[in-house]
Image: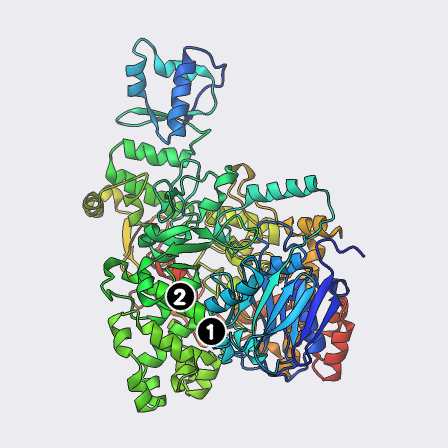
Amino acid sequence: MEEMNAQQTASPGADIVRLVREDSAAARLTRLSVLKEQFPEMDVEGIIAESGVPDLKKMRGKRDTYFFSDQSMTEAYAAHLFRIEEKDLLKLIAETVRDESQTYPRPTDARVFLGAPFNVAEHDLADTLERLAASPEYNDIRTCTASNGALYLYSSKYLGEAYAESLAEWMEVGQKENP
Amino acid sequence: MSTYGYTGRILRVDLSSGKIAIDDTLKYKDFIGGEGIAMKIMWDEVPAGTHPFDPQNKLIFGSGPLCGTGVPCSGRTNITSLLPSNPFYGVTSSHMGGYFSVAMKYAGWDMIVIEGKAPSPVWLRIEDDKVKIEDARWMWGKGIFDTQAMVASFMGKDAQVAAIGPAGENMVNLSVIRTGTSHSAGGHGGIMGSKNLKAIGVRGTGAVKIAVDSKEWLELNRFMMSIIGANNQHVVPSSPQPWAEYTDPTSRWTARKGLFWGAANPPVETGECDPHDMQSVGLRTMKATFDLGAGAEKYTVRMGGCAHCPIRCHSQLKVPQLERYGMDPYVSNTCMGWSSPRGVMFKGIKEFDGHGEDSSIVGTAIGTTLADDLGVWCNYGQIGRDLNYCYTNGVFKRVLPAEEYSSIRWDLLEKGDANFFFDFYNRVAYKKGEFSHIADGSYWIAQRWNLGDEYWNNKDMKLWSRLGYPVHHSNEAGGQVGALISCFSNRDAQNHSHMNFIGAKLPVKILKEIAGEIWGSPAALDAPNNYTPMNEYKARFVKWSLVRTMLHNSLTLCNWMWPMATSPLKERNYRGDTSLEAKFYSLATGINISERELDEAAARCFTLMRAITVRQMQSFDLRKDHDQTTEWVIHREKDKSGNELPQFTPGTIAMEKEDMELGRTLVYREFGWDEKTGAPTRACLEKYGMPDVAEELGRRGLLPT
Ligand code: SF4
């Protein structure tokens, strides 16, 4: 994530900055391609870079470049949206799982991807999990099942099998039995 | 001496003589309030060897100096007495939320001490200074809901009522005292029953005076509101939110766009709930779906709770199907209140009576209504596991007369038909047959039905101690920290001071940093299910948790929220403020006290509870006679493939025997108790300003040598 140069805010950048901030407040990333359509005569990226507003952040993906304001959206949430926008479900799931296995650390409840902001359809999730299991690039992504049948994912780079299993059991069953 | 914070008065009611007296609270102020003062009264006035149901036993309803002041989450009532389900009738406290203690304060009473036994059923009517013992013969036999309505019909609907149901009247060991629609104090219902006391109604028209000017008070309140989280002080949301850096699907901060109080008119969306938005604090904890599953959304009218609580952790539902069973469709509860009936239906609630996919919610609502009306306690979920064990292992077949066994509706239990609840709770509350002893408590059924080691040491039974109580945030909560915390009570530990911190849902790295700041080293906290051997910092964490919970029960604050060790604020690096209790106490009472001094006062109260336990057990070797766990706690676990997981490897919560003994020693040291036996020493009791306690224990030969 790159931070914009901190310089004075001025027109014509002001409109663009306002737009990005509005999008972020509405929990959306702003796509460079969309900005270019709205401001066809302008070097949008250059203007943002020179606008000098420290809250604007940029993420460069394969499909597009995205902006958000960290006044109303955390980098963590923006990272989710970025992965969603990039429409690479394998990567979305694998990177989210790796993040959680490393950060908290904990395995990831597969049902998380069915809810907002991911909103992956159930059949897409099942299909993606199958493809994940067969993909060498993501061979650290493993699954385990709690005793109530709930499926969890974890990265073996950060969690061992027995550990991931015990955490999944705790999250899924243990906590509910010990309210 | 000023009475700011305190009302300064204790109401004493002797039901044997009918005498009503007033005592001075401030002579007890070294014991803070609530549970602390109650321990002092129990020590001074209830002789060793008293049975819980003897008239000499006392039943003490306590509020504290912060109750009724408007401090967030300060509406809890502490109830202290002897516990009939404990083998030596240990002194314990149970707790209710609601508005009862606040009404006590507004009526001018810090505590209500009930002693003696009325010759026939009575209820106690308190309207400010006017206190009357009223005839309750007509109320006797009624459920708690009807009783509350009857008292309200005399006193008005703004009266707060604490009452027992048939279980309490019949002196069932596992019975509750309940106030409001869903606030139950477990374990002491039978004490009220033994005293022929059906209910207490309180109406207060006064106020609680605080020492400080309102500006300073409001500022501190505002600060508190800025660092408060969701229920259990969970400080991250359960699903990704634009404002949140972290999430955890197990968090009680369940609000999100698209999740509604679906039965409100119009439905209320819980929404994003940015932590900087004070107006949405009460929407953060959507507990109905958390406790009951997604299907509860459409039944949720709103979230309710205790006086002066912005969090509201009690789900209030409208379940119209209940009318079919002659029940009020409005039903409310939280946590164990919902899950314990589900534990009784241990084969699951399946489709019944044509309720289809709503069967589980309708069935649970039937169970919770019956338990709450009849006043049955679950011993923190243990009653369901005991039922499961005795049914599955053929104990009932062995110990029940054949006719009784065959009269029980096991067919409903097997089918997952929630009509089983009618059979179960009625037998228990009315003490019908041998089966009803299931509600004597685990220790007593183990004796009576000769359940043996297999029962005690069975991991699935979750029995923590041979004193008959189960896990309650034990070794699964911080390894030795939760394990040791669970060793010092006379019932389930009911301690959330450690759990609110461990379970705040922040990454372990951040929690370890905060642990280092509070207890001296990040080594005070391990990652969940990845424990390291015992150390002195964990012992400090244990002492702090025991002391803070005693403090909250004395002030009286909700330990399901307090202490505020963390916050949801990134700009504070997720730090909370552990000095808030002392700051509020100082402002409310005008007695300036530091965080350390207030913790020491609570440590005094906890040590006094320990001294009462020594006197009751007639043993000062508490390490051996009191503080031990059942065997499963220290047995190696296996992973899914059947491989043994040695203690202190990732994936096991098993504790290690010698390490636990070291843990006990280190905790005893932190309190200044005898390191060999865990009993308070003369020097320690004198240091805490209790030479009289040292004197009596010495006279009885109960001081460690
Ligand atoms: S968090 Fe729940 S139990 Fe605690 S004071 Fe609030 S409503 Fe009552």
Residue B344 visible in the current orientation: yes
Three-letter code, disc 1: Lys
Tell me where residue B387 appears, x and y as whole percent: 37, 77
* B36 relative position to A92: left or right: right
Q: Which residue is mark 2?
A: B368
Q: Quadrant of the C terminus of chain A?
A: bottom left
Establish if B24 lies above or below B18: above
Residue at image position (52%, 57%) is B560
| Residue occupying the point 34% across, 91% down | B401
Dot 2 or dot 1: first in sequence order is 1
Q: Residue at x 47, y 20 (%)?
A: A53
Q: Which residue is mark 1?
A: B142
Residue type at numbered disc 2: Thr
- Answer with the quarter of the image where residue B614 lies: bottom right
Mark 1: secondary structure: loop
Whether residue B378 is visible here, answered yes or no, is no
Residue at 66% from the left image edge and 59% from the top image edge: B107
Co-location on one chain, circles 2 and 1 = yes
Residue B676 vs B394, above or below: the answer is above
Q: In what element is the residue under mark 2?
A: helix
* Picture coordinates of residue B247, whole percent (x, y): 41, 44
Question: Tag 1, which chain?
Answer: B
Q: Chain of mark 2?
A: B
Query: Residue A15's spot in the image, x, y percent?
Result: 40, 15
Residue B589: numbered disc: none
Which quadrant is the N terminus of chain A positioned in?
top left
